[in-house]
Image (spheres, helix red, strand yellow):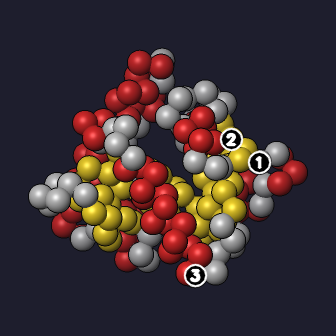
Amino acid sequence: MRIRSAEACELPFVQDIERAAGEPFRSLGMAAVADDDPPPLDELERYRRSGGLWVTDAGDGRLVAYLLTEPVDGAAHIEQLSVHPDFARRGLGRELIGHLASAARSRGLSALTLTTFIDVPWNAPYYARLGFRALGEDELTEGLRNILKAEAAHGLDRWPRTCMRHPL
């Protein structure tokens, strides 16, 4: 498995990973998350062009995981991290996050941040095991507050969410 930048022709495969990665939410009573559309191609292309879309290649050209990131308030913000369920529990998410941490350090960013569901086992508890810490309301930056507002407008606040940070 190797991590690399996505190619433009691979964006539909990134969408396929997102659809598959959403399915496990159905078993938690979160069908709306499972049924949510993946990021549109133009949005994925924007991330790709800016260097913020990395994929994990299974070695045969097949994409099995991806990470979307962009700088937010001096940190590398993880907008989305998804692993195809057929490749879950193999450390691919951790490897993508490690790749991002190295890149963020080299760009002089201070931390990794993300927003996630509190009660989903492969969300906040997973990130806590990787060294992320939930932020209190008084620790949220303007950029993180804006992200939470956008997520609420999309309906994600129906379930408890949190912002997390990992210092670099």
Disc 3 on helix, strand or loop?
A: loop
How far apart are labels 3 and 1 at the CA level?
A: 23 Å
Disc 1 on helix, strand or loop?
A: loop
* Disc number placed over residue 135 in the picture, else none: 1
Kindly tell me whether residue 137 is visible in this rendering: yes
How far apart are labels 3 and 2 at the CA level?
A: 26 Å
What's the residue type where badge 1 is placed?
A: Leu
Give the x, y percent position of residue 164.
68, 49
Q: Is residue 132 above or below residue 161?
A: below
What's the residue type where badge 2 is placed?
A: Thr
Kindly tell me whether residue 20 is visible in this rendering: no
Report if the CB atoms under discs 2 and 1 are less than 8 Å apart.
Answer: yes
Tell me what residue is drawn at x 37 percent, y 77 percent: 49
Give the x, y percent position of residue 76.
59, 67
Give the x, y percent position of residue 63.
23, 54
Question: Label 3 crowding class (10 Å Cα cut-off): few <14, some 14-19, many 20+?
Answer: few
* Disc number placed over residue 156 in the picture, else none: none
Residue that badge 3 annotates: 107
Tell me what residue is drawn at x 55 percent, y 38 percent: 126
Give the x, y percent position of residue 97.
49, 58
How far apart are labels 2 and 1 at the CA level?
A: 7 Å
What's the residue type where badge 3 is placed?
A: Arg
Residue that badge 2 annotates: 162
Q: Is residue 56 above or below residue 25?
A: below
User: Upstream in the sequence, badge 3 or badge 2?
Assistant: 3
